[in-house]
Amino acid sequence: MPFLDWYLRRSLATWLLLHSLVLMSFCFQPATTLPKGCHSSEEDGYKTLRCSNAQITEVPKDIPNDTNRLYLDFNQITYLPSDAFRNLPVLMELDLSHNSLGHLDINALRGLSDHLLSLDLSSNKLVSVNKEVFANLKARTNLSGNPWMCDCDLQELIRMVELDPTSSNGIVCASSVLEEHAGKPFLQVVKDIDLCNTYKRTTDVAMLVTMFGWFAMVISYLVYYVRQNQEDARRHLEYLKSLPSKQRHNEEPSTLSTVV
Ligand SMILES: *[C@@H]1O[C@H](CO)[C@@H](O)[C@H](O)[C@H]1NC(C)=O
Ligand SMILES: *[C@@H]1O[C@H](CO)[C@@H](O)[C@H](O)[C@H]1NC(C)=O
């Protein structure tokens, strides 16, 4: 009996101890729980949240607000909604590469303009993006590896974005307003042609062709007219030649008479 009593008391004490340990561990856990599939670390003095390759389909809502670097690469994010990264006032680096992004809300990157230094949107499914998405953004941006539609909108967008210089050749036209550009690097295409002026160019060409047509008509009419006149002139000359032989006979005595 005393043994059983001792045993029970002891197990009760152990249980209480365990219980309080569990409670304590709850109390000392950081107040912010990390998003699923993410782990946080301090790299080079920067708070880094890595959520790479975590089967994430949308931007997590509970990202700690002191995050400096955020890696969301190799996931299945398809869309960036309005204010996708709000309440991240010290975010410097954002990696969204290797996702399925096809659409960015016009306000998707709102609030990042003062502090974001690097933005990776490479290897997504971006065909066209409203240039206002990047308004005021100073971040070096990687836009390579997307199925871009090369048109005036893209030209204006790229004029606005601070492109990562080593990535600029990776911006390739999957399609284009002019078919012959498909498969070519965007920067090579815009070296030869202003994509915002192709309409004007085609009208210019049409104008030139029309003017050339008119010019050719005028020239051929002139040539025809001159030839016709030459013919007329020759005929007239021949007529004159045949005519004056009589006239000369008539005139000769008169000249003679005047000489006399
Ligand atoms: C994060 O949020 C907390 C609580 O709202 C706030 O006290 C803190 O200043 C914020 N941190 C940053 C870096 O803004
Ligand atoms: C840009 O993205 C491409 C494709 O993901 C990658 O190969 C390249 O290294 C990136 N460039 C920079 C400078 O990050």
Image: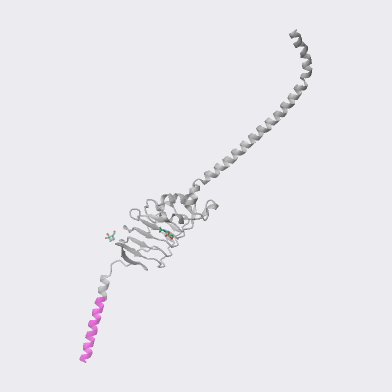
For the question of whether residue 85 can be seen, the reply is no
The answer to whether 232 is drawn above or below residue 116 in the figure is: above
For the question of whether residue 201 can be seen, the reply is yes
For ligand 1, give the image quadrant. Answer: bottom left
Where does residue 89 sit, x and y in percent of width and height? 31, 57
The answer to whether 44 is drawn above or below residue 6 in the figure is: above
Residue 234 among magenta residues:
no
Pick the quarter of the image with the C terminus: top right
Where does residue 9 sit, x and y in percent of width and height? 22, 85
Where does residue 2 sit, x and y in percent of width and height? 20, 91
Q: Residue furthest left?
A: 2
Magenta stretch secondary structure, dominant: helix
Snapshot quadrant of residue 49: bottom left
| 179 on left or right of 57 | right
Q: Which residue lies furthest to the front in this view?
A: 260
Query: What residue is shown at x 76% (from left), y 23% (from top)?
Result: 239
Q: What stretch is highlighted in magenta?
A: 1-21
Query: What residue is shown at x 25% (from left), y 79% (from top)?
Result: 18
The answer to whether 100 is drawn above or below residue 137 in the figure is: below
Query: What residue is shown at x 32% (from left), y 66% (from top)?
Result: 40
Snapshot quadrant of residue 234: top right
| 216 on left or right of 55 | right
Residue 11 among magenta residues:
yes
* Count of numbered marks: 0
Q: Camera-side residue: 68 or 186?
A: 186
Instruction: Please name the colour scheme applied to the rendered image.
Output: one colour
Q: Residue furthest bottom?
A: 1
Pick the quarter of the image with the N terminus: bottom left
Where does residue 87 sit, x and y in percent of width and height? 33, 59
